[in-house]
Image (spheres, coloured by chain):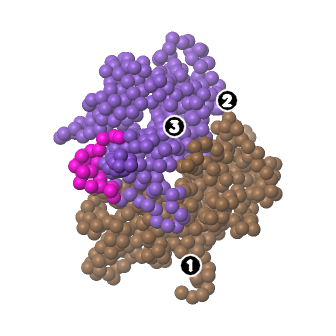
Chain colours: A purple, B brown
Amino acid sequence: MTLLSVRDLTVKFATRNEPVTALHGISFDIAQGERVGVVGESGAGKSITGFALMNLLSKPGFIDSGQILFEGQDVTQMSDRAVRKLRGNRMAMIFQDPMVTLNPVLTIGQQMIETLRAHRRLSYDEARQIALVKLKGVYIPSPEERLDQYPHELSGGMRQRIVIAIALLLDPQLIIADEPTTALDVTIQADIMELLLELCRSNMVGLMLITHDLGVVSQVTERTLVMYAGRIIESGKTRAIINDPQHPYTQGLINALPQQTPPGTRLRQIPGSMPTLSMMPSGCPFNPRCELATDLCRANMPDITQFGEVQVACHEVQRLQADLNTAEAAQ
Amino acid sequence: MSETQSDSPLLRIENLEKRFDVDSGFLESLRFRGGRIRRETRAVHAVNNISFDVNRGEAVCVVGESGCGKSTVARMVANLLTPSGGEIHYDGQRIDTLHGKALMPIRSKIQMVFQNPYASLNPRMTIGQSLEEPTKFHNPTLSNGDIRDKITGVMKSVGIDPAWTARYPHELSGGQRQRIAIARALTVDPEFIVADEPISALDVSIQAQVLNLMLQMQEDHGITYLFITHDLSVVEHFGTKVAVLYLGSICEVADTRTLFAAPKHPYTKALLSAVPQLKDDSPNHIRLKGEIPTPIDLPDGCPFQTRCPMANARCRAEKPAAFQQPDGAIVACHAVEEGRSEPGVTLQEAV
């Protein structure tokens, strides 16, 4: 069953001149309990997507058009009050830096109990009991003591686990995790990712994992969206995208990883860098960096088409498919 | 260059130590213990008794998690910090005791590239000025024309258009800025570059560009690198030798191939297994108990014993000495020495 359905979502940022477009009409679905990865480089629009889903865009950003259907309701049309009921309750967000997410002047317990009592009619003691159970669920040692501690008394890994516990407090249907382990060390990252994966699996919670790390996406998610310059340029099963990427950008991104070339040899780099929002090239946004770019790519933005197991937005892939079709027809 | 010089390592680090005082003021240092007030100053033990060599033409990588002292080592080698103990020898000369004028020739031989090119370039200086300053300083006899030629050459070699000298750092992207930072290090013709996480602030596709540039410089100018990083896939690609640090102490030093093929120290094993692999969808890493202790109160014995799955009474009492393995790796671990086998850790114990 579809949990979240995003249709033609366009997000713009007001500037002194014309508003600039950060998201160009993106569409995707997340099913109940499905884990979806969103990958891309900085400026691709991954975090903006996450914020827009929670209706958390702050000025000068705004949703220009499109629909965000969560459990059948359009988040973009909801009143502030209705959205507040949704946030933290039906969908929760985990941010990159737990030191910034947690309030430094409130104890862990106060923050958890506050969240619970804001959404449900619970007594203080009942809320504290639920908080304890959730802390145990993320394997926090001696949870009773932790409830009365402040965030600065805990280590980075422990803080991020508390943030996960808070996200899970009200048993949400969807967790949006925006680079949840980027601020943590490798050994801690591995534990947190495993924990997140286990919790999502056992509670049937949908996960939207925003990250730049293809390795993490490959290990945690079932489906992947690749974003570039405010567009989804490729999407499909994670396995299919990692093993057989179609879009030249996805191919470049995977091939640029040091694991993909023998030690000591040159890495296969993508020339240039991502265009800024105000200097977007015409046609396909990747065309200035693409080896296969033709005049068509410089003129028109390609539509998203099915190719094998993945959906791709690329003229070259479409041409390839057309060739294949004519070859088949000739046979 | 004489025979003896080429045989000896270019950089030799011996028993290097660095402590940072935490309680710097008089009142901060007062403690109430055992019924009386005493003066005690606590210190962060950032680097404890580290020794390794860097040979000419090598790219030695120092890896470890945050707080393990890898950046402190880099800064001491670049002479930006004074060691609390131990010695640093460069090309047969002890450099950690040098000051002022005597340090000048060393400064032009050892250059440093920092992590964040947004912070390491002066925002009020044009690219040209940023590159000109070190060139003039270290080559006072060069004419302005020669300096311009040199800068143009260096900018071309790092793939930046020489016409950009009039631009300011904010006009450039992260990858371009890091190229400028590398170009600035190259203007004084260094033999040795200390690079402290030079690519971790950059995007994946840009990381490849900068890493390729550094490989290119190694071939063209014969530069030796001390490369500080937390990213093991970069180490495998770039490094010839790896030193794994944990809490200011060396766990393992080995050739890159040896280390990746046969890691020995339990921490090295855990670190390698924690790297998310592209083609493997079932996360199956070696879990460690808890998290890194604070370097103010170092644990007794082996620094890794609090998280080590193989720790026993000896590990908790006695700090292991580094010893050489048959394949050349240098490992500091009692368990490896005794050949103890490894039990598993559950997720609950780990986190």
Disc assigned to residue B91: 1
**Name of the residue lying farthest toward the front:** A331
Identify the residue at horizontal 34%, vertical 44% (top origin).
A313
Q: For the residue marked with disc 2, what is the amino acid?
A: Ser
Q: For the residue marked with disc 3, what is the amino acid?
A: Glu
Q: Secondary structure at mark 1?
A: loop
In the image, residue A130 sits, relative to residue B233, either above or below, namely above
Q: Earlier in the sequence, mark 2 or mark 3?
A: 2
Is residue B148 rendered to the left or right of residue A215?
left
Q: For the residue marked with disc 1, what is the amino acid?
A: Asp
Q: Circles 2 and 1: CB distance less than 8 Å?
A: no
Task: Indicate the chain on which mark 3 is placed.
Answer: A
Residue that carries the numbered disc 3 in the rendered image? A222
Q: Which residues are magenta?
A: A281-305
Is residue B24 rendered to the left or right of residue B180?
right
Q: Secondary structure at mark 2?
A: loop
Residue that carries the numbered disc 2 in the rendered image? A142
Residue closest to the eye, A290 or B190 = A290
Q: In the rendering, at what x and y percent does residue B172 appear?
A: 31, 57
Task: Indicate the chain on which mark 1 is placed.
Answer: B
**Res B95 → quadrant:** bottom right
Task: Indicate the chain on which mark 2 is placed.
Answer: A
Category of crowding for the residue at label 2, using alpha-carbon neighbours closer than 10 angstroms: few (below 14), some (14–19), many (at least 20): few
Q: Secondary structure at mark 3?
A: loop
Q: In the rendering, at what x and y percent does residue A270 appear?
A: 38, 57
